[in-house]
Image: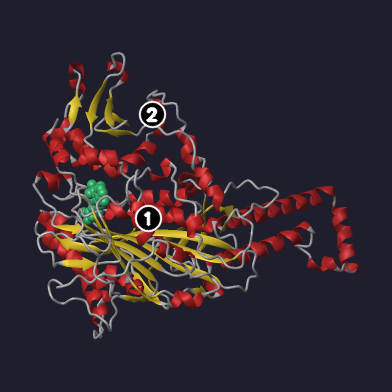
Amino acid sequence: MSSSRSLRSSISPFRSRSLTPGPPPPAKRPSKTSSKPPTSKLPSKPSISPPISTTPSTPSFDRPDSSKAKENVTVTVRFRPLSAREISKGDELAWYADGDYTVRNEYDQNSAYGFDRVFGPATTTRHVYDVAARHVVSGAMEGINGTVFAYGVTSSGKTHTMHGEQKSPGIIPLAVKDVFGNIQETPGREFLLRVSYLEIYNEVINDLLDPTGQNLRIREDAQGTYVEGIKEEVVLSPAHALSLIASGEEHRHVGSNNFNLLSSRSHTIFTLTIESSPRGGNQAEEVTLSQLHLIDLAGSESSKTETIGLRRKEGSYINKSLLTLGTVISKLTDGKASHIPFRDSKLTRLLQSSLSGHGRVSLICTLTPASSNTEETHNTLKFAHRSKYVEIRASQNKIIDEKSLIKKYQREISTLKQELQQLKHGMMENPNMMAPNQDDLVNLKLQLEAGQVKLQSRLEEEEQAKAALMGRIQKLTKLILVSTKNTLPPNIPGKSGHRRRHSFAEDELAYLPDRKREYIIDDDAGSIDSEIPADGRSDITNLDELVKDFKRNKRRGMLGWFKLKKPENALGLSLGVDYESSASDSPASSSKSSQNKVMFSDVKGGQRKSVSGSGDDPSVVDSFPERTQAGDLFSATVGGRRLPPIVLLAGKLLMLVENRLHVLLPSSSLPTPAHSLVFTPRL
Ligand SMILES: Nc1ncnc2c1ncn2[C@@H]1O[C@H](COP(=O)(O)OP(=O)(O)OP(=O)(O)O)[C@@H](O)[C@H]1O
């Protein structure tokens, strides 16, 4: 057994300190008049915020007033467990969760902070989602802008919280699923969803959905700031949205520092734009439009973060923008500040609308409990505490007709249907046929005399026009999402209690790291427990390189499995699973959507954004499809067995089976039965 293994068994990273006896101090909601953010280094008494409901009530469409209430930013903090690295360095717990609402310092019991919720190291991301993000997502479904962001020092768990791992999906995949679940629970409305994904790297905005979209500019209009030219893609299913994130992640800047092998070097903003209108309503009815921003910030880096060259340059950009964020928050809560320096960084400029209070905001601060990071953690806590005083007014956005993409599509569908009707009645070309006069009759007679051939070709042309119209109607109709439930209640309050829980098809989360592999990687390469048969050694020339490659490819490895589809077959590996069907059966699978793209110009005449919707089979059917139904979207992506994960690294084919990493050797060198290296990850 390796040394770090024995360490792990003696010091559990999940260990928690016993709670301070007695009830917490009385709940006190901060407000500008009753209290101010602490200016002294440490508050003498913890200021405890009241607990927030895990199932927040959400306003219905008919009660817009309730959505205009003054609120504060929801601020939660999440501890991660001590990492293997911290444990091996002899780190102790410096800060800990003292109950559900307080963070306390181990060495100074008076040093404590109160938040809407404090999550201990054993809390699941799903629980974090339920408490800290679900109400923001529900609000966005009803037209209230929402922003959820993770803030913390490098390696504190931001990406873990926002993106997660396959076994524990993060806020972003959970929110995507929840949005589609919400649509299913809202039979009275129809929805149009589009996504964009960008990163801010060294103060440059890059489009993660379109690698050609580099160095994009921020513009401002009456609705707030926006990124000019960013690609937006209409999404039809959770799998579709997650596949876009997966491809976006491939372009994100990631690098390693001495705290984190896969440190985010850029801030990312995933935006889901949600439009909805009453189902089957007339065209004059209002549309609600909201944007849900899910943000994974890069982590602040202290002098302890050993970086050189490019990493150091990145670190200084990261720190500068986070510093500006801190300054903006301070000024916003100051009450006296006349100028808020939103323009001092791209991040604060893009967050301007959210931080100014237009919509719900949830800040999740991630913390390491380690004593070696006491000061950094304290800074995060102070930032989190200040942020609690930012006031927001969550109001529902109703938009006028011409700004709405869903209306534009609905109008186009209706016009096309009319055209089709006319064509069917043979009136398209000659509206005067409604009341034929003498001249028409003469014309008709002449046409008839021109012979059968001409009539035939005319008929064919009309058939083609009809087919084109029907194809277009079909494509547009499928972009609009509706519930499979057909009752049409007038109000759609949030029925969160009845909502279907998230469940993911494994392929949907394939881009996320695998937790088991995570632990292999967190451990030192030297401690990998290898059972190498003597005759197998010659096949592994450089284990270090293999492990290094493995680390390097951790994030992309799962995507690589898709790419291995064909080579696997080519290698003659019979693995008994039809990858092709699991990856592409979904009507909205990424490969299909990228093959059949239909470009539409956006609400701003194509200048502000390009919007692409995935097209459908161009073959024309003789009846129109229903709207894309949310219930089908779930079942379409579930099913089929899954291969054990396989990845090609350093020229070796690796397979993870029951926590063991097998190195599959070339078949020519295979003795019987299986000839493999087995690494036992330490869990
Ligand atoms: N709550 C948690 N439970 C278990 N492991 C966690 C948790 N949070 C983070 N980790 C692990 O800690 C490591 C660092 O996490 P992560 O990459 O999310 O940090 P980060 O804050 O995004 O860092 P950076 O700012 O450098 O990108 C990862 O190996 C991750 O799996």
Q: Is residue 135 visible?
A: yes
Nearer the observer, disc 1 or disc 2?
1
Q: SS class of the residue under badge 1?
A: helix
Report which quarter residue 505 is drawn in: top left
- Mark on residue 172? 1
- Residue 354 position in % (x across, y down): 35, 72
Query: Mark 2: which secondary structure?
Result: helix
Tag 2: Cα neighbours inside 10 Å, few (<14), some, or many (≥20)?
some
Dot 2 beta carbon under 8 Å from ligand 1: no
Q: Disc 2 marks which amino acid? A: Glu
Look at 27% across and 78% down and name the residue there. Answer: 332
Q: Specify which label sits upstream in the sequence, 1 or 2.
A: 1
Q: Considering the image in quadrants, where does the N terminus appear?
A: top left
Dot 1, crowdedness within 10 Å: few (<14), some or many (≥20)? Answer: many
The image's colour scheme reads secondary structure
Q: Residue at x 58, y 46 (%)?
A: 617
Q: Nearer the viewer, residue 578 or 661?
A: 661
The C terminus, quarter of image: top left
Q: Position of residue 237 (x, y in %)?
A: 49, 51
Which residue occupies the foreground of this view, 143 or 71? 71
Q: Is residue 543 above or below residue 166?
A: above
Residue type pointed to by label 1? Ile
Cα–Cα span, label 1 and label 2: 31 Å
Q: Which mark is residue 568?
A: 2
Q: How far across and down, in percent of the image, does residue 71 sit?
A: 37, 75
Q: Are marks 1 and 2 in contact (CB under 8 Å)?
A: no
